[in-house]
Image (spheres, rainbow, N blue to C red):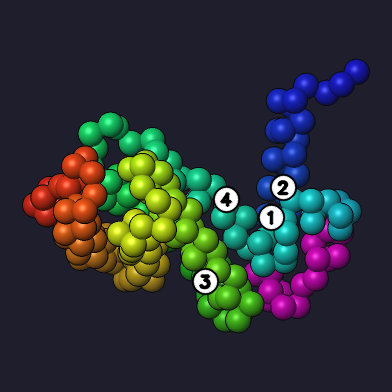
Amino acid sequence: MTEPSGRRERKKAATRQKIADTALRLFLERGYDAVGIREVAAAADVAVTTVFAHFASKEALVFEQDEDFERRLTQAVTGRAPHEPLVPALRREIEALVRHCTADGAAPIWRMIDESPALRQYEESMRSRHARSLAAAIAADLGLPGETTACRAVARFAIDAFSLAREAAEPEAALDEVFPMIEAAWAAAGRSLPAREAVPAEAGAG
């Protein structure tokens, strides 16, 4: 009898999470460079091919929520209320992501990332990809070409705001400082954008 699709998806998600959790535990215990994919697979009790069925690379094991973060960023644009300005919606999601990435237990993971050139390079490419996806979502939401400079700029600013806040001693204060600048830049760009996004700077990012 064929297994129901819902159950298959739950089992698939559970296997993926088990692999990611096992990999992270080994990386933190022994060092990222000291652990190979075969060791991760053995510790998770899966085949090497199963690891690669869920993760395209060793680096991806560390950033296992990559796709979820990208989806949340684009949905902050596409899922907001019809008359809600863009920048406050982006700030709300960036705040949530920063809280997640600065929660208890996150510091050793970021130290590991900072100490590994491969992981730093992967994170940089991941942020660039998130910025491209976010810019495309903003442009599509406004019915604009995907290469619109204003959309690309605000997307990059938002991704950079996440990085700056995550690294700051006081993440909320960092966002309070950065987002008014993003708001002002987006309001200035509003002269060439549809009226929906031509919001005054005093609307704030709150």
The residue sitting at the top extreme is 1
Using the image as rendered, state which of residue 197 and residue 122 is in the foreground.
197
Residue 96 appears in the figure: no
Residue 20, numbered label? 1
User: Whole-percent x and y of residue 189?
Assistant: 21, 58
Q: Nearer the viewer, mark 1 or mark 3?
A: 3
Q: What is the CA distance from the residue labelled 4 to the residue labelled 1? A: 14 Å
Q: Nearer the viewer, mark 4 or mark 1?
A: 4
Query: Residue flagged by tag 1: what amino acid is it?
Result: Ala
Asked whether 39 falls inside the magenta stretch, the response is: yes
Query: Residue flagged by tag 3: what amino acid is it?
Result: Glu
Q: What is the CA distance from the residue labelled 1 to the residue labelled 2? A: 6 Å
Residue 124, numbered label? 3
Q: Earlier in the sequence, mark 4 or mark 3?
A: 4
Check if mark 4's residue and mark 1's residue have beta carbons within 8 Å.
Answer: no
Q: What is the CA distance from the residue labelled 4 to the residue labelled 3? A: 15 Å
125 left or right of 174 in image = right
Residue at left offset 60%, top offset 81%: 117
Question: Residue at label 4?
Answer: 67
104 left or right of 28 in image = left
